[in-house]
Amino acid sequence: MTNKTLIPHLFRSEFSKIVAVLCKTFGLSSIQLAEDVVSDTFLKATETWGLKGIPENPTAWLYRVAKNKAKDHFRRTHVYNHKIVPELKNQSTNFTEPRIDLSKNNIKDSQLRMLFAVCNPIISDAAQLTLALRILCGFGIKEISNALLSNKETINKRLSRAKEKLRREDVDLSFPNEVELENRLNNVLHTLYLLFNEGYYSRSSEKTIKKEVCLEAMRLIHMLLDHRSTNTGKTNALMALCCFHSSRLDARINQDGSHIVYHKQNKEKWHEGLIGKGEFYLNLSASGSKVTAYHLEAMIAYWHTRKEEINDKWNHILQLYNQLLQLSYSPITALNRTYALAKVYGKEKAIEEALKIKLSENHLYHSLLAELYSDLDVNKEIEHLQLALQFVTTENEKKFLQTKLDLRLSS
């Protein structure tokens, strides 16, 4: 691996580890300092490795330099605050250098604590996602803005406000106690669920970033599964859901970044290994006493990986959607249910139910209605394709819908 490709790779894998350890050592209020130290470390690596070549153990080199930079900063601030200022007041103090532990076990513990700190309900879902991508996943500002379809200025402001809120509320990196754990874990799982969806359902045209966001969400869920107190039924259910969805990731995205509808996906591109892992985690999820939305969504995703010829496939999916809507209603879930409804009871019944859903300004809603009307009423199909074009926000999807509309108008 060349210097040009190695440093970005190491930044993604090591940034969050070093930041988490430094925050555990110096406090979460020092999060900006930790980021600055790590950024300076990678800048030094770029300069030094470009001149002297890549060291034998690049990761160890980064850890050593980061520790030295953090200690240097601590010495400077300590000397000023605890020596110069006290001497002016005729006082004295002892200096104790901090121990920065970048061992494997401490990195793992620090990252788990950071996960709970970042996924804190005192900041908005959007802020949690942005912080997670930056602090837990090591994404650059440009990558985050691409993943969230935003701009760098907005992302920087969101990060700054979130860090200030955590500092002001004196949030620390202590692991939640037994009483707090369930509620805190629920919020962490919700954030990771949203994070995965940002990759899986992203409207970004950058295919690589979509996949990387999904993989990072799964890595963080795996971190929870590695810890006894957070390895729960619902954690396993969320991992199963992510595995099943990820198994179809390559099949559902065209080269231009546009989405391929389910029935047109090339099933040869479905990843059997991930489907097998999904089944493994789905079996483990049964260990809990409560069925959650993650369990139901994982089961729906499981059935989507089954071949079409399996009896009652769509009936199973429809019944699971019915349960999910009873547990937690959302218009998008209701919209997804109409596809299964069409498979079981026909398009007329699906249209009847779809028209009850309040998503009239959503392009996916009109795209689905256009699909349902395709064999029944060409004029209605055209009408909904035109409405979908009014509300679509990305160029790739706009081109896809326009091509479909043009074909219909010319036929």
Image: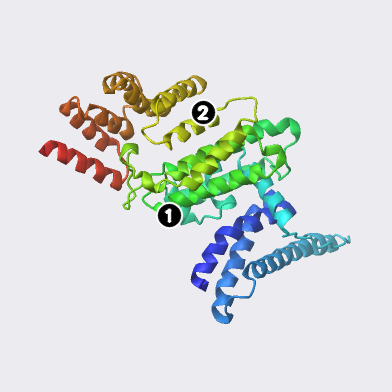
Q: At which x and y percent is residue 289? A: 65, 25
Q: How many marks?
A: 2
Q: How crowded is mark 2: few (under 14 residues within 10 Å), some or many (20 or more)?
A: many
Kindly give the residue lying farthest to the left in the view shown.
410
Label 1 SS: helix
Q: Residue at x 51, y 49 (%)?
A: 215
Q: Which residue is drawn at 18% across and 32% down?
A: 382
Q: At which x and y percent is residue 17? A: 64, 56
Q: Which mark is residue 366?
A: none
Which residue has dot 2 on it?
Answer: 296
What amino acid type is highlighted by mark number 1?
Thr
Query: Could you tell whether 265 is left or right of 61 in the image?
Result: left
Task: Choose between 317 and 184: the one closer to the eye.
Answer: 317
Q: Which residue is drawn at 42% across and 36% down?
A: 306
Q: Examine the rendered structure and indicate whether residue 235 appears above or below residue 296.
A: below
Residue 9 in sight from this viewpoint: yes
Q: Quadrant of residue 167?
A: top right
Which residue has dot 1 on it?
Answer: 208
What amino acid type is highlighted by mark number 2?
Leu
Query: Could you tell whether 60 is left or right of 302 in the image?
Result: right
Q: Which residue is drawn at 78% across and 65% down?
A: 79
Residue 26 in sight from this viewpoint: no
